[in-house]
Image (cartoon, rainbow, N blue to C red):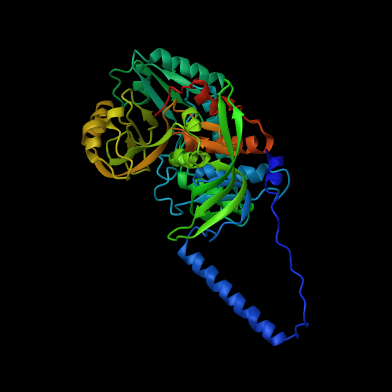
Amino acid sequence: MFRACRALLALPRPGRRLRSGFARRWDPLGDLQKSLTNFQSQLKENITTLFDNPFFDEKRPPVQAEVVIVGGGVMGWSVAYWLKALEPRKNALRVLVVERDPTYSRASTVLSVGGIRQQFSLPENIQMSRYSAYFLRTVNEHLGVMNEPPIDIQFNPSGYLFLATEERAAMLEENVNIQRAEGAEVILLSPTQLKKKFPWLNTDGVALASYGLEDEGWFDPWSLLTAFRRKAISMGVHHCCGEVTSFTMAFCNSVTPVGEELMVSRIKYACIQMPDSLEYHEVACALVVNAAGAWSRKLAEIAEVETSSSKTKKIFKLPVEPKKRYVYVWHSPDGPGLNCPILIDTSGAYFRREGLGSNYLGGMSPTKDEEPDIQDLEVDHEFFQEKVWPKLAHRVPAFESLKVKGSWAGYYDYNTYDQNAVLSVHPVVMNMVIVTGFSGHGLQQSPAAGRAVAELILKQKFETIDLSRFSANRFLSGKPVLERNIV
């Protein structure tokens, strides 16, 4: 794929025109004055940009880039970093990251609770999280920038604690066997052992529990995002604030694995609308990475609509949509204290400690009938009072007298098909690579997923972890890859 990048960008480059006529008379003072004027103008522009935009975004994108990454969250910047880290020679790739919200006020990354765990049911998910745990332990070796302070992601290794009823105990034990086979340090606890280790816990209705001893806990999402971003920019990645609103496409006919005719397409240009402006910029590109998270389906549909093929729409539709989730923060002076992991209750409610001042945060995924409106990030406080709090107070009696201090809402890039990641080339748009659909565990897997996408682009295959099961082709073949441990 990398070898094709340059060929696809075989665009005419501007040359210098020949001059004719009389030679210009040399005016050193005039030339110096012009140079000073240009320098002052550029300095004023740069200073204005510096103070107006704390993220120092470039005002305009380059006219061409081998790879355009749509989405400047942790996944997009991870891909950008790994592309530069693994490129065959320095500056072999021009990479552009496009983010429509440089403040990240609605970004899933910074609105996450920051958990990392190995307690999944699929080997691929376990392997990705184990690799990410290694990456986070050595984050300064990867993302450290010269003359910048060391990176502190504020990792708290308190583990995950999954509780299971009698009906789900066998499945929990099976999951733990899979996790141990992949090298994860997880133990099983009986109700008696559970009560001894966590005396603040009510074990009614709990038949078995699993507890992660290593590489599980939580960290600061913002610190990881800014570390990826700073490092990638230092390595030469371009970035701009804007929104990709359309593509210019090229088309050809193909046949699916089951023999159906299919029109496939290739993106030639990405059209970027600049913020608070009617100005558009076209960027010639060899490849587009769809890292738009909860809005990745919308971006994919833009390319599919440009294909203008109703047959295409019937054959493939990216099953990823935004799901709004609430996070509540409360104070409980008699709560679990420092000996508090991320607890996943039998009811689906979860919580963890937040800091050292007897504060906690948590929430619960709503049922299908309770799914909230995604048009805004308003929080439903009655949902906590009626659905979450009773379950928390049952499991931790000290939470009966808790006091809510705050709340927020964020989006999952929810894969409605099988709640698992999509990491592959788009089945219809030949030069769009998709990295989305993590359904709540994208932040913790971003180091591994970013590397996997970079390997797919540069080497046409996965090398570190084989993630071929997460191909988008499973939507066409009707073979879901189900993850049983979705929180």
Camera-side residue of 195 and 207: 207
50 relative to 160 in the view: left or right: right
Above or below for 409 versus 254:
below
Taking 404 as reference, is 246 left or right?
Answer: right
Picture coordinates of residue 162 (x, y %)?
Answer: 39, 24
Residue toward you, 417 or 340: 417
Q: What percent of the width, then of the height, locates residue 121?
A: 48, 21
Q: Left or right of 110: which side holds 337?
A: left
Q: Quadrant of residue 1?
A: top right
Whole-percent x and y of residue 114? Answer: 44, 39
- Residue at image position (53%, 29%) is 472
Tally of marks? 0
Is residue 363 at least partly visible in the picture? yes
For the point 55% across and 30% down, the residue is: 128
Q: Nearer the viewer, residue 451 or 185?
A: 451
Indicate whether 159 appears above or below 373. Answer: above
Q: Quadrant of the C terminus?
A: top left
x, y percent for residue 366: 30, 31
> Can residue 134 be seen at all in this image of the molecule?
no
Q: Nearer the viewer, residue 166 or 298?
A: 298
